[in-house]
Image (cartoon, rainbow, N blue to C red):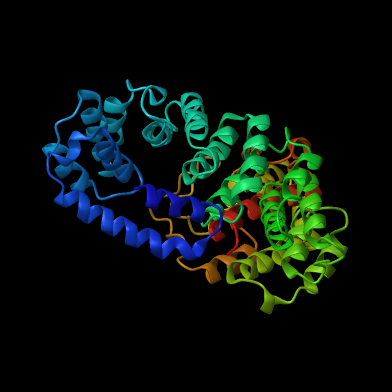
Amino acid sequence: MRSLQLVQDRIAGGDHAALPMQAKLLEMTDARLRAADAGDFKDPKNFRALLVYGMSGGNPVTVEAAASRAATDPQSLAIAKGVVAYLNGRPAAAIEILKPIDPMSVPADLGAFLALVKGSLLATDEPATALTLLDEARLLSPGTLVEEAALRRSVGLAATQGDAARFALASTQYVAGYLYSPYASQFADSFVSGVIALHMSISQDKLADITSMMDPEREKVIYLRIARRAAIDGLSDLSAFASARAEQGRNGKGNQDDPRAVLYSSLSTVTSATIDDVRARLGTIDRGKLSESDRALLDAAQAVAGEVVAPVRAAAMNETEAAGPAKSDAAKPAETEAASPADAEGLPPVEGAMAEQPAPVKPADAPPAPPTTAQAAAEAQAPAPAQPETPSVLPASAPAAAASLDPHDPTDAAMLKARRQLEQIDQLLGAAPK
């Protein structure tokens, strides 16, 4: 087990070539533990090795069989039961068994893993306790794969708790020590989500300090992902900052020719007063250099930009002016269709994605949602049918300025509609670009 832990620590530091060695050592350790008898586990170190093997991703069948043959103290047997429940996907049982056991009261080689497992189990129900346990795991096992995992989990938990200072510190420590870990992509996901969630609490200077410790390519990718998420959420300042940093590059090596940077920086201003300039920039993007999801996003952005500058149909305006008060009132819902949340119904639902507001109730004979992305993109460009007049409701991620827009004003209504369509498009396309 000591050899396995040394290999895992090399992996955490970025030695991906050690991954096959880890698999071989796990296989050898499993065979030795299966063959061990009760006499082998009289030495407490050997039983601790069994527990560490289990918490390192070992075979729960092996752990359970070996523990049943061992004669050791009740606390160690309880930890073994909790580990088996954890490995078998029974978190409630694992929490009940392991919660009374203090990781700081057992030997450090076992306590570090125990704190990490308990912190992971309590992350959802008791995030504050989980953060304390993850700190204990790091204290008991610095510079190891345990610390890498504890820091990675701390980044996401701090963002969930709204603790910007802790989020920034954990992110800085992770980038400084474990940026080249094979699990760093999970850190990147948590980091980008945390920057978006805590954008009001984290300064751009602090964000730049953290990313400056990355190599230029990783820094560019992080900024591109932040720019995309910020543009979709209507965080124009953050999107503009991240897009500029992605285009600027480092050491004089700019990325102005990266079509993703151009696309994401344009999204945040697609409903602004410079819409003609934005349309021109979108037209210069080389579609062949975009992923499939970003090509669909480009199509949708161009469609939204086209709708913003589309002239109001004169025939419809004349009919409204010629009609009496009753007919004018009846036509009013059509004028405010851009502000209705039902506009985006042309987009199919995303599996696992939760809508920002309740979907309107449809009649029983309503047609099903379109099954393909191509059909959804086509319908996004077509004029939507008139909807009943409803109060304008903005998602929580929209900027405060958007809340003051008047849905009865044609320009403001178009801007509201465009923002909603962008949010629906992001749900349709999924998470960050590949």
Determine the residue positioned at 38% across, 47% down: 2
Q: Position of residue 301 (x, y in %)?
A: 70, 63
In the displayed structure, 80 sits above or below 303; it is above
Dividing the picture into quadrants, the one containing residue 366 is: bottom left
Residue at the bottom extreme, as displayed:
288
Quarter of the picture containing the C terminus is bottom right
Q: Is residue 323 in sight in this rendering?
A: no
Q: Is residue 324 left or right of residue 359?
A: right
**Count of numbered circles in the view:** 0
Q: Position of residue 133 (x, y in %)?
A: 46, 28
Determine the residue positioned at 20% across, 49% down: 33
Determine the residue positioned at 32% across, 29% down: 95
Q: Is residue 168 left or right of residue 97?
A: right
Residue nearest the observer in this picture, 106 or 372: 106
Q: Is residue 74 left or right of residue 256?
A: left
Q: Position of residue 197 (x, y in %)?
A: 64, 39
In the displayed structure, 5 sits above or below 257; it is above
In the displayed structure, 178 sits above or below 173; it is below
Dividing the picture into quadrants, the one containing residue 19 is: bottom left
Q: Is residue 143 left or right of residue 275?
A: left
Residue nearest the observer in this picture, 181 or 372: 181
In the displayed structure, 311 sits above or below 183; it is below
Determine the residue positioned at 54% across, 54% down: 181
Q: Position of residue 112 (x, y in %)?
A: 43, 34
Q: Is residue 414 in sight in this rendering?
A: yes
Dividing the picture into quadrants, the one containing residue 72 is: top left
Residue nearest the observer in this picture, 24 or 82: 24
